Amino acid sequence: MAGETFYCGNCGTPLYYGRKFQEHTPVRPCPQCKAPNPISFHYCYRCGAKILALEEIEETA
Protein backbone atom coordinates (compact mmCIF):
# COMPACT_ATOMS: atom_id res chain seq x y z
CA MET A 1 0.00 0.00 0.00
CA ALA A 2 1.49 3.28 -1.10
CA GLY A 3 0.20 5.44 1.75
CA GLU A 4 0.96 3.03 4.58
CA THR A 5 3.36 4.34 7.22
CA PHE A 6 5.23 2.42 9.90
CA TYR A 7 6.66 3.91 13.09
CA CYS A 8 9.65 3.05 15.26
CA GLY A 9 8.55 1.15 18.37
CA ASN A 10 11.20 2.93 20.45
CA CYS A 11 11.01 6.60 19.44
CA GLY A 12 7.89 6.94 17.23
CA THR A 13 9.77 8.21 14.15
CA PRO A 14 8.04 7.41 10.84
CA LEU A 15 10.00 4.68 9.06
CA TYR A 16 10.53 3.91 5.40
CA TYR A 17 12.66 1.31 3.66
CA GLY A 18 15.71 3.46 3.31
CA ARG A 19 18.13 5.14 5.69
CA LYS A 20 15.77 5.39 8.68
CA PHE A 21 14.75 1.73 8.34
CA GLN A 22 18.41 0.76 8.70
CA GLU A 23 19.07 3.23 11.55
CA HIS A 24 16.13 2.03 13.65
CA THR A 25 16.25 -1.70 12.94
CA PRO A 26 19.18 -3.90 13.98
CA VAL A 27 20.35 -5.48 10.74
CA ARG A 28 22.86 -8.05 9.57
CA PRO A 29 24.15 -8.55 6.04
CA CYS A 30 23.01 -11.39 3.82
CA PRO A 31 25.88 -13.87 3.39
CA GLN A 32 25.21 -14.06 -0.34
CA CYS A 33 24.30 -10.57 -1.64
CA LYS A 34 25.31 -8.47 1.43
CA ALA A 35 21.93 -6.67 1.56
CA PRO A 36 21.08 -5.50 5.11
CA ASN A 37 18.25 -7.58 6.57
CA PRO A 38 16.46 -7.10 9.91
CA ILE A 39 17.79 -9.60 12.44
CA SER A 40 14.33 -11.21 12.68
CA PHE A 41 14.45 -12.33 9.01
CA HIS A 42 15.47 -15.95 8.32
CA TYR A 43 15.71 -15.45 4.54
CA CYS A 44 17.07 -12.48 2.61
CA TYR A 45 14.32 -10.22 1.29
CA ARG A 46 16.39 -9.49 -1.83
CA CYS A 47 17.86 -12.82 -2.98
CA GLY A 48 16.09 -15.42 -0.80
CA ALA A 49 19.28 -16.91 0.69
CA LYS A 50 18.99 -18.46 4.17
CA ILE A 51 20.39 -16.24 6.92
CA LEU A 52 21.68 -18.17 9.90
CA ALA A 53 20.65 -17.00 13.35
CA LEU A 54 23.47 -16.09 15.73
CA GLU A 55 22.77 -19.28 17.70
CA GLU A 56 23.16 -21.38 14.53
CA ILE A 57 26.44 -19.65 13.67
CA GLU A 58 27.85 -20.37 17.15
CA GLU A 59 26.77 -24.04 16.93
CA THR A 60 28.55 -24.57 13.60
CA ALA A 61 31.80 -22.91 14.78
Image: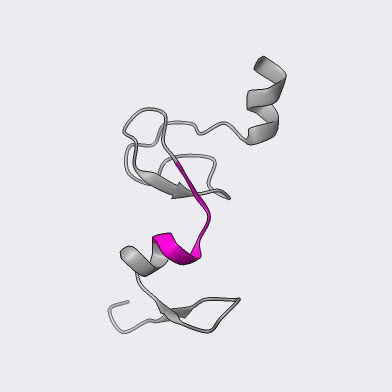
Q: Residue furthest top?
A: 61
Residue drawn at (51%, 34%), measured in percent from left and top? 51
Residue under the image location 31 percent in, 33 percent down: 33
Residue sitting at 48 percent across and 66 percent down?
24
Residue 52 sits in which quadrant?
top right
Q: Position of residue 43 (x, y in %)?
A: 48, 39
Which residue is nearer to you in this view: 13 or 50? Answer: 13
Is there any visible trace of residue 17 in the rendered image? no
Q: In this view, does 48 lie above or below 38?
A: above
Rendering coords of residue 58 (x, y %): 69, 24
Q: Quadrant of the N terminus?
A: bottom left
Point out the image quarter for the C terminus.
Answer: top right
Magenta span contains residue 47: no
Q: Which residue is drawn at 33% across and 37% down?
A: 47
The stretch in magenta equals 22-28
In the rendered view, would you say 4 is above or below 25? below
